[in-house]
Amino acid sequence: MQEATVKVWDPLVRIGHWGLALAFLVAYLSEGEPEWLHSFAGYTIAAYLAVRLVWGFIGPKHARFSSFLFSPRKVIAYLRDLPRGKSERHLGHSPAGGAMVIALMLSLGGTAFSGMALLAAEEGEGPLAGYIAQTDTLGAAQTAPVVRYEGNDEHHEGRGDDSVWEDVHEVFANLTLLLVLLHLAGVAMASIAHNENLPRSMVTGRKRA
């Protein structure tokens, strides 16, 4: 007899989930080359995050933030019980899954914003071009403050804003990659603990009733 299932994930959540994963993969592996592809992937991420933020308030039950925002105590308890197979099964996001959704949204948001800031600083382009001044590489090198250390002849020139944004962008990108790896590990463990294929449910939208 076929097991009864129930609809959990709506199309926007499902398509957005896989589209976001693909966009991040493209952006991370391209590393800015070619720039148009890297930028397109970044804008795709930013656009979906904006839509998902709104959907978290007006979407169906399991898409809403109110359905998967748990206290830190519940998140820790779920993670503690998961390896032992004693964690409580949730039809929507589990406490750990909900926490990961928020962490990924924040990290991806930081990655997208810093990427747009870097584009504005380096090329004077993008939606932040009017807010973040473009760095004149030659001018910055000529006017950058020099820090002189007594006892040696080392000179350390100040770095342009584009270098700062590049560092921030790289930190957020690597943090996002780490979160993705933790997410994959968590999904695998939860699938085993609850005896269900969680990745498949994000394709079909249905889970065991």
Image (spheres, rainbow, N blue to C red):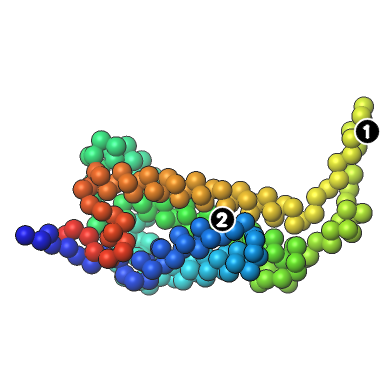
Q: How crowded is mark 2: few (under 14 residues within 10 Å), some or many (20 or more)?
A: few
Marks 1/2 in contact by CB < 8 Å: the verdict is no
Tell me if residue 87 can be seen: yes
Relative to the observer, which residue lies in front, 30 or 157?
30
Q: Quadrant of the N terminus?
A: bottom left
Q: In which quarter of the image is the C terminus?
A: bottom left
Amino acid on which disc 1 is placed:
Asp
Residue on which disc 1 sits: 153
Label 2 SS: helix
Amino acid on which disc 2 is placed:
Leu
Would residue 11 appear left or right of 148 to someone viewing this image?
A: left
**Residue at the location (75% across, 67% down)?**
123
Q: In this view, does 100 lie above or below 80?
A: below
Q: Residues within 10 Å of mark 1 (few under 14, many from 20)?
A: few
Measured as percent of width and height from the top left, residue 87 is found at 25, 43
Q: Which residue lies furthest to the top in this view?
A: 151
Give the CA distance from mark 1 to mark 2.
Answer: 40 Å
Measured as percent of width and height from the top left, residue 81 is found at 28, 38
Would residue 49 appear left or right of 145 to someone viewing this image?
A: left
Residue on which disc 2 sits: 29
Measured as percent of width and height from the top left, residue 116 is found at 65, 64
How many marks do you count on the picture?
A: 2
**Residue at the location (71% across, 71% down)?**
125
Quadrant in the rendering for residue 74: top left
Measured as percent of width and height from the top left, residue 37 is found at 60, 67
